[in-house]
Image (cartoon, coloured by chain):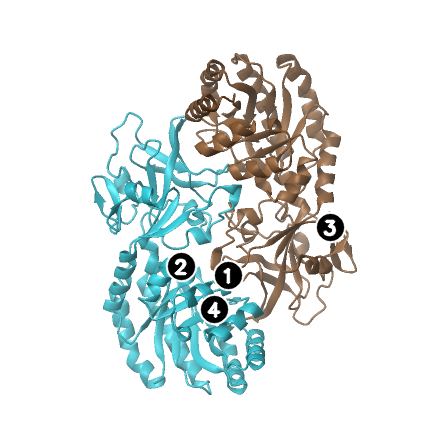
Chain colours: A brown, B cyan
Amino acid sequence: MTGTKPQHAPQIHFPVVDDVLQVGGIPLTRLAQRVGRTPFFAVDRALCTARVASLRAVLPPQVALHYSIKANPMPALVQHMAGLVDGLDVASGAELRTALDTGKDPARISFAGPAKLETELSQAIAAGACLNVESGHELASIARIGDATGITPRVALRINPAFELKSSGMKMGGGAKPFGIDAELAPALLGQVASLGLDFQGFHIFSGSQSLRLDAILEAQSHSIELAMRLAGDSPLAVRHVNIGGGLGIPYFPGEQRIDPAPMGEHLAAWLPRLAAALPQARLALEMGRYLVGEAGIYVTRVIDRKVSRGEVFLVLDGGMHHHLAASGNLGQVIRKNYPVVVGNRINARGDAPDSGPASATGPLCTPLDILAERMPLAHARIGDLVVVFQSGAYGASASPAMFLGHPPALEVLV
Amino acid sequence: MTGTKPQHAPQIHFPVVDDVLQVGGIPLTRLAQRVGRTPFFAVDRALCTARVASLRAVLPPQVALHYSIKANPMPALVQHMAGLVDGLDVASGAELRTALDTGKDPARISFAGPAKLETELSQAIAAGACLNVESGHELASIARIGDATGITPRVALRINPAFELKSSGMKMGGGAKPFGIDAELAPALLGQVASLGLDFQGFHIFSGSQSLRLDAILEAQSHSIELAMRLAGDSPLAVRHVNIGGGLGIPYFPGEQRIDPAPMGEHLAAWLPRLAAALPQARLALEMGRYLVGEAGIYVTRVIDRKVSRGEVFLVLDGGMHHHLAASGNLGQVIRKNYPVVVGNRINARGDAPDSGPASATGPLCTPLDILAERMPLAHARIGDLVVVFQSGAYGASASPAMFLGHPPALEVLV
C-alpha cells in the first residue's frame, strides 16, 4: 500500500553506521552528548562545502555565487560560507553585522529589504556594503545620509519584474508587490541615481524561490537577464553586477525530487556571450540560501514520552514547532505535510515490536499545531531516543517562535 | 459592494479622540513616544480588569476562574491577572517561574504539558504547584522525584476525553491525542495515584479552544462535568478540583461575532447542584487565556515606506510576521484572512486622497508571507503613521519568530 504512495526523496547526505545516523563522521548519539542537551540543530560543514563545489562544477567560472544569510544566520556557518562564496546577502542590520564579522570585503555584501530603517541605511553606507534600493523614498534617504556622512553610497536597484518564477514556493515578482522597484519605473530611478552621484552597481532581480522545476527556473533566468539588458539600455551608468537570485528548491515532502543543476550551467553559459556583448563590465551572480545549506542540516530532538492513545502511537518530544515552525507545517504551507523524519539512533529497526506501525511525533507545546510527524512509518522508538528531522539546515531556528510557551531555545552546532 | 461582504466585528474597546486611537486614556501617538520606538504590543490593563469582571458578573460565585499564562506571559500582565483570577496555569518551567514571581499561592498554580522535563517536574514539586499528569510514565517520574525529595507531589489527571469541542479553532480532545490520559485509562491511573500516596487534586479536561459557538461550548462543558463525575466514581480519592478549560474565542476575521457569556453562567449554575451532590469537595474551574486578554491588546507598527506598485498601495511597515505570526496568517490558519487593522493616528480619514482605496500592509521581511493586511480599506497613510492590529493581546510576541531575519524584537507594554 505504501509502495503506491508518494515517498520522500532518499536521504543520501548522512550515512548510517550500525543503525545510527552519522553527522560529520560522528555517531548521532555521541554528537548529542557533545552538544550537551537536546533539542539542537546540527549543520554538517562538509556537506555545505560539497554543495557549493557541485554547483561551481556545473556553473561557468564567470558566474558569481552568493550566500543569502537569512536562510541560516548562525555565525559559525556564515563564517564557513564566506570562505566558499563570492558574496554575502543580508536582510537586516543584524545580518549585516554577522556578515562583516566574517571579514568578507564589504563591497561583496549586499543588503536587500523593503523597510530598511535609517539606522540600517547608515550602517550599510558606513560599512561600504551595497544597498539594494527598494523605492524612490529609500533612494532619497540613502542620498541624504551619504551627503551627511561624506561617504558615497554603493547602490543597486532591486527590480520587481513583471514576470514570476512559475511553480515556486515563494513568489517574489510579477504583478503588484512590495518588493523592489517596478521594472517600468526603473528608468526614472536610474536617472536619479546618476544625478545624485551614487556609486551604481547594477540590478537585483528576484522572481521567486523554492522551485523544483528546472525549466521554470531557467525561463525566469532568461527573463531576468533580458530585463537587465533592457534596463541597462536606459541606464546612464555602467552596470557592473546583475544578481538574478536563485530559485532552486530542495525536496521536503513526499513525491518531491532533487533537481539536477547541470542544465542550468549550460543555460547560463549560453547567455554569457550575449550578456558580455551588451554589458561588458557586468558580472552575473546567483544568490542562494536554502539550496546551499538546507540539506546539510538536521534537527534533533529527544523522546520524552511514548504514548498509545486509542490505538495510535505518539512520540512526545522535547522539541517541536517553537524550534522548527516550517516542519510543523505553519510557515507558508496550506496543507500540512511531513518533512522526512527518522529515529536517528534506530534507523532501520522497523516493524519488530508488537505495537509497531505508523507513529506521530509531537512536541512539548499544549497545542495540536505542535507536530513534527503525522502517522509516519517510524522505527519503534523508546523514551530517550533521538528523533531527527532532515532538510533542516535552512529556515529552522531563526524562523521559529522560540519563546512560545517558554521552553528553552534550540542549540545550534556546526559539525 | 463592501456592504455585502462580511465585516470585522466592531472595535468597541479602544476609543477614538480627534481621529487618534486611545490606549488607557493616552493618545496612540503619545504612547508611541512614551514606549520609545516601534513596533510594540500594548495591553490595556483596565480592559483586562473589565473582561474578568464581566465574566464574574455572569458566573456563579462558586466557579473559579484561572488565567492560562501561555496566552500572554508578559510578567507585568501576569502580575495584574494574578490579582484578578483564582489560579494561574502554566505550560513550562519558565512560565512557572513567572507565575511564582507574582506571589500567587503555589497551590493555585497548575502545570500542564505533554513533555515535561525532569527538571520541570522537580521545579513544580519543590514549588508546591499542581502537576497535571499527562501519562503513566510521567506519573511514575513524579512519584520518584517526590520520594527523592521528601515532598508529596500535588497532582491532577489531565484527561483526553472521547468527545471534542465542536467548531473550535484548536481541538484538544476527541480520538487519539498526545494530550492527557485517555478517559478509559484513567481508572487504572487513579489507583496508582492512591497507592503512590500522592496529593490528588482532581481532573483537568480540555476539549478545545477559540470557539465562537456558545452552544458547542456549553455542550462540551456538560460532557466534561459528566465525565468528571463518572471518573470520580472510579476514584479512591476525593476530587477537590475540576478544571474544564475555557474554549471561548474572540472574533478575529470578517463575519465573526463576539459571544455573550451570560447563558454560560446559567448553564453552569444549573450544573452546580448535581456536581455538589456527587463531588461535595470539588470546586469547578474555568481556565482561559485568549478570552481574558486577547481583545485588550494591540500591535503597533510604523509606516516606513508607502509604495504604489502596478496600481496597488503597499504600506511597508517596521513590523510584521516576526512579531505577530498569527496576524500574518501563519499560525494554524489554512486560508489567510485579515485581522482588524487601522491606521491608528488617522482612523477616519478615508477616501480623501487621489490614490485612496484598498491598501496592503506588509512587513520588513523579504518574504511574501510577511503581510499584516491584504487589500483592506484603510485611511490614506503617510510615512511615519502608525498601523494598528487589533485583537493582539494573546498569542502575539511570544508566539512569533522574533529572530527571523534579525530585526529587533517587539517591545511590550502594559498601559
Q: Residue B112, labelled with which disc? A: 4
* Disc 1 to disc 3: CB gap under 8 Å: no
From the image, tell me which residue sits under label 3. Answer: A14
Chain that bears disc 3: A
Of badges 1 and 2, nearer the viewer stands 2
* Closer to us: A407 or A120: A120
Q: Residues within 10 Å of mark 1 (few under 14, many from 20)?
A: many
Residue B43 in the image: above or below residue A233? below
The percent coordinates of residue A410 (x first, y second) are 58, 55
- At label 3, the amino acid type is Phe
Mark 4 vs mark 3, foreground winner is 4
* Circles 1 and 2 in contact, beta carbons < 8 Å: no
Q: Is residue B328 above or below residue B399?
A: above
Residue B10: image x %, image y %?
26, 48
Q: Is residue B343 left or right of residue B199?
A: left
* Cα gap from disc 1 to disc 4, whole angstroms: 9 Å
Can residue A167 be seen in the rendering of this structure?
A: no
Q: Which mark is residue A365?
A: 1
From the image, tell me which residue sits under label 2: B75
Residue B315: numbered disc: none
Q: Mark 2 or 4, which is nearer the eye?
A: 2
Q: Are marks 1 and 4 in contact (CB under 8 Å)?
A: no
Above or below: residue A334 compared with residue B124: above
Structural distance between the alpha carbons of marks 1 and 2: 20 Å
Disc 1 residue type? Leu
How would you rate the neighbour count of disc 2 (Cα within 10 Å): few for under 14, some for 14-19, many for 20 or more?
some
